[in-house]
Image (cartoon, rainbow, N blue to C red):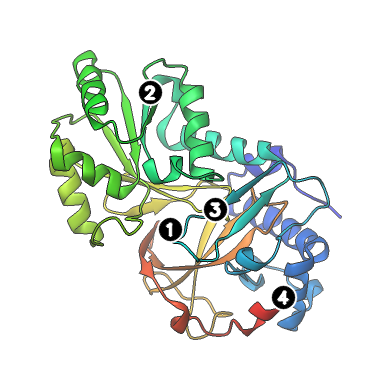
Amino acid sequence: MIIPDKQQVFSINSKAQFEQAALQVFNYQAENNAIYKQFIEGLRIDVSKVTSVAEIPFLPIEFFKSHAILSTDAPVEVTFTSSGTTGMITSSHHVTDKAWYEDSFRKAFALFYGDIEDYTVLALLPSYLERKGSSLIYMVDDLIKQSNNPDSGFFLYNHDELYHQLKKQQEAKKPTLLIGVTFGLLDFIDNYTVDFAELIVMETGGMKGRRKEMIREELHEVLCKGFGVNAIHSEYGMTELLSQAYSKGEGVFDCPPWMKIIIRDTNDPISTLSNGKTGGINVIDLANINSCAFIATQDLGKIDAGGSFEVLGRFDQSDIRGCNLLIA
């Protein structure tokens, strides 16, 4: 059985190469991932007859809350866990090869933003820093180190220190990335206002129950005004993935070449929708070769004619249909 290596996955530059690698990963995981295999059998899908990406079934993301999703018996190097309120069942993503994750986020960042060493990376991620197992903290910590810049670093609730660092960056005219959880960025601009047009403000989503939820347009308008920027960037990733999509404004995201978004019909999870129609977001993440690369998320979205996508919200359990196989 042919299994794509890092070189093949991270050098994908065409639809044909993606399709070939995705089918190879599918065949490998359909055989070696016990939970995914059982899920496919429950759908009565003949693996040998799956000859295109459009025919690949997507594992509901909820399985990461109840099962260890692994396609290998290699030892687990790190386990990432999702955040959640007290009593909530959280997801666990067991990663057997950290290099897949590191290569994925390093190469994706370089693809969208260039050399990390050109930036000062400032991180305002209090809720993530306050718990263990965050894949976002792992990524940002690595980017801070890779920036090789003594001014890069994390800020917890020390907003005054962050404000002065931002002013320092602005005066020095240094390219600066401020990556923050949504409520943290809003808390900061409640007390401080900067006018730093060159600053890249990247929100990672999430009020974490700390503030009233806001629609994206309202949120980005408030953040643009508070930081003096023309657009708010965003990162689309999650505990269960090892790759991220990025938006440079207007909430429109693009994927790196080894990641793909497909929109499914919320009434018929096996069916997909054409561009422009709203449905559930399915993700193919070929960096997830050792867990599951084909995940049906709980996010709602749509794809535009150019292949970019928007995240329009989430649907609750009552909206999820056709997932009775979750009892597997």
Which residue is tagged 4?
A: 39
Q: Estimate the spatial distance between the alpha carbons at disc 4 and disc 2, rounded to whole Å.
A: 44 Å
Q: Estimate the spatial distance between the alpha carbons at disc 3 and disc 2, rounded to whole Å.
A: 25 Å
Q: Amino acid at mark 4?
A: Phe
Q: In front: mark 3 or mark 2? A: 3
Which of marks 2 and 3 precedes in the sequence?
A: 2
**Numbered mark located on residue 225 in the image:** none
x, y percentage for residue 68?
71, 60
Q: Amino acid at mark 3?
A: Thr
In depth, the one of 291 and 311 nearer the eye is 291
Badge 2 crowding class, 10 Å Cα cut-off, few under 14, some 14 to 19, many 20 or more, is many
Badge 1 crowding class, 10 Å Cα cut-off, few under 14, some 14 to 19, many 20 or more, is some
Q: Estimate the spatial distance between the alpha carbons at disc 2 and disc 1, rounded to whole Å.
A: 28 Å
Which of marks 3 and 4 precedes in the sequence?
A: 4
Q: On screen, 318 above or below 31?
A: below
Q: Estimate the spatial distance between the alpha carbons at disc 4 and disc 1, rounded to whole Å.
A: 29 Å
Which of marks 2 and 4 precedes in the sequence?
A: 4
**Numbered mark located on residue 239 in the image:** 3
Which residue is tagged 2?
A: 119
**Numbered mark located on residue 307 in the image:** 1
Contact between marks 4 and 1 (CB within 8 A): the answer is no
